[in-house]
Amino acid sequence: MFKRILFFTVVTAFVFSLPFTFGSGVRKTGTTAAKFLSIGMGPRANAMGGAFTAVANDASALYWNPAGIALVNKYEGLFTYTSLFADINTNFLGIVIPAGDAGTFGLSVTAVNYGTMEVTTEFYPEGTGETFSAGSYELGISYARSITDEFLVGASAKYIREDIFNSSASGFAFDAGTVFTTPFYGIKFSSAITNYGTKMQMTGQDLLIQYDSDPTRNGNNANVDANYATDQFELPLKLQIGLSKEFTFLDDQKFIVAIDGIHPNDNSQYVNVGGELSLFKNMISFRAGYKTLFLDDSQEGLTLGVGLHYDGLQFFNISVDYAYQKYTYLGNTHSFGLILDF
């Protein structure tokens, strides 16, 4: 009875706060560092519009909600590749290791490649002949366990680094999440907070300058080594609350519907919705969703995807997933993923 009352109170407060929350009109876009951390990882989740915190039950939970890896009962590896706009590519590797009563452990690596660019200056606007590259990286360690059959908890610790030419910035962050299977028709309620951590500040050789501390005096050292003091920027902190429900029909055919409310620190609040239809005992899945509902000037929207799963191999099971995401101005993106279960 207590669990029912608690769940009803939380969900009621969440639903009734939506009109006030999403009508705030706060504008904080472009105020955080390491924005690559906001790129959704895993084509299954992306195809469902990012409404995944209450669904997460594979290695992509390392990104969406670390509590979800407690549902993985085999050794599992996930690799994804996402082709973004402007020749930007994102790769994600996740490994989940169940350890029985000790819980479940995970490791994740994210790498974003921005390609090679030419060095230009005000005197050489067409290029100096030099080139430089930029990249963003994240390394995470996760742990999750079942407190009860209905309640899961998990957390991640992450090292984050961004490089451009001869300068870089780094920081640390933590994720934490829960999944609660409610007594109301098996509806799942989840919460996750991601990227809570240190600020990031750019440092490096490119910020080294020669400085004259007193140009009005003769005879002093006019070439003192100094560094530009760049600003510190927060990480893209995000709070997500989700609901999901799985329906079974016609001999183990499944349909999942999910909704997530997101409160980021660098934009206004919004809602993601999505669904997944799995046929022939999960052999083939069709997915669709919509991102950033109620967000003014949203550049995202429709998402679609498909997945194939085969578990008849002798030593491992395999899943192949694809996701398509529509952007208003930046072009459409395509994401591919491969999951192996041992």
Image (tube, helix red, strand yellow):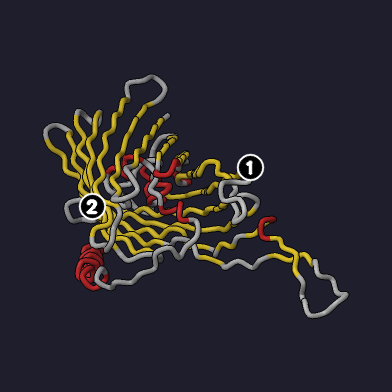
Q: Which mark is residue 113?
A: none
Q: Vertically, is 224 above or below 144? A: below
Query: For mark 1, what is the residue?
Result: 129
Badge 1 local density, few (<14 within 10 Å), some, or many (20+)? few
Query: In this orientation, which residue lies closer to the viewer: 21 or 193?
Result: 21
Left or right relative to 119: residue 16: left
On screen, residue 17 versus residue 331, left or right, reads left
Give the percent coordinates (x, y) of residue 5: 21, 67
- Residue 220, percent across and down? 85, 74
From the top left corner, tell me how far across and down residue 197 is, in percent. Answer: 51, 62
Of residues 250 and 123, the one drawn nearer to the viewer in this rendering: 123
Tell me the amino acid under the disc marked 2.
Answer: Val
Which amino acid type corresponds to the residue marked 1 in the rendered image? Gly
Residue 32 is situated, as x and y percent measured from the top left of the image, at 47, 63
For the question of whether residue 339 can be seen, the reply is yes
- Is 100 left or right of 329, judged from the image as shown? right
> Mark 1 falls on what kind of element?
loop
Classify 53 as above or below 225.
Answer: above
Height in image: 237 above or below 138?
below
Q: Is residue 89 left or right of residue 301?
A: right
